[in-house]
Image: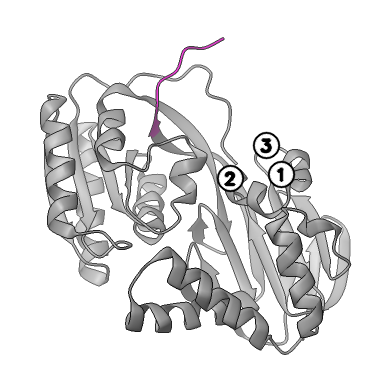
Amino acid sequence: MTGSFSRQPRISENPAITVLLNARAGDTNAAAFRKEVTEALTSAGASFKVMEMTPGSKFLEAARQSVLQAKTDDGLIVAAGGDGTINTVAALCCEHDVKMGIIPAGTFNYFARDLSIPTNAADAARVLVEGKIERVSVGYINDRIFLNNASFGLYSKLIQHREEVKSRFGRFRIVAVFAALVSLFRGQKPFAIALHVGKETLLRRTCMVFVTNNLMQLSHLDKDVAEQTPEDGMAVFVMRPTTRLDMCRLILRGVMRNLASDSHLETFCTDRFDVESRRSGIDVVVDGEIVRCRTPLSFRVARRALQVVVPARDDA
């Protein structure tokens, strides 16, 4: 969850801006996206360079070198891409306490929208020059950062199927929604876990555990839970074994933003918990990317760990 917008320091005047641009984000036209970003930053009088890259080990190494240089120069690193790109850059910026900007170009852009960053590239680019720095909290699963959500079980199958469908039909929102519905109806074989929350241990059989620390996404799942989840907290949804009819009801409640009232979902809020499983490793979806995590899984909130540029607004 993001924190208060009070006492925001302004960006240092005319900082050196390095834009790490993912040309494959969402359904973006790479040439048009780069042109839009470049023109917006030029018109704002910014000093910048754009590095166009594709995800992978080379992207990670280039991003790391850029972050280290920004640390030396008191510069600004900008992630231009989808949630996966933003996640990668945010992890490095957190590690080295470097200021980060965002130009969203993904399918859902939950993190950017939660911070009121425009989804239009030109408007988001102007925020980099006119905005202020806000320290926001982030989530971790083991040593891996997440800005929106981390989930395992049915959701990992959903993401795998979504990527297969997108590779055939394109990276469009309607394709993602269709793939999600198909995966939900296919279901997931239940598995046993132990949840350690504070001093309490919960033994559960589940189809999926979904953890979100993003208020925008949480409000789309359940309005009441979003209102009740404390600042710097995580909302945890544990899905009990379901039939296809149960899944239909869950989807309907999701559309109505009232998931937590369903008897097949157990929900709680916390800033830290652990998950034990008989498996030595679990495929976890972290901000839309599937990663293999060793068990036990440790979830926690790192308070105000990331410096990010947000739209400036007057303090009350």
Instruction: Provide the residue designation for mark 2.
Output: 216
Badge 1 amino acid: Ala
* Residue drawn at 74 percent across, 43 percent down: 229
Spatial CA span between label 2 and label 1: 8 Å
Instruction: Provide the residue designation for mark 3.
Output: 231
Q: Is residue 40 left or right of residue 272?
A: left
Q: Does the rendering let one see residue 290?
A: yes
Q: Does the rendering let one see residue 282?
A: no
Q: Is residue 233 left or right of residue 21?
A: right
Q: Nearer the viewer, mark 2 or mark 3?
A: 2
**For the magenta stretch, what is the residue range?**
309-316
Name the N-terminal-most of marks 2 and 1. Answer: 2
Badge 2 amino acid: Met
Q: Residue furthest top?
A: 316
Q: Position of residue 90 (x, y in %)?
A: 39, 49
Q: Estimate how packed mark 2 is, as few (under 14), some (14 to 19) or many (20 or more) residues with alpha carbons within 10 Å.
A: many
Spatial CA span between label 2 and label 3: 13 Å
Q: Is residue 312 magenta?
A: yes
Compared to residue 41, the image places residue 13 above or below, namely above
Compared to residue 153, the image places residue 67 above or below, namely above
Instruction: Provide the residue designation for mark 1.
Output: 226
Badge 3 amino acid: Glu
SS at mark 2? helix
Is there CB contact under 8 Å for labels 2 and 1? no
Q: Is residue 50 left or right of residue 130?
A: left
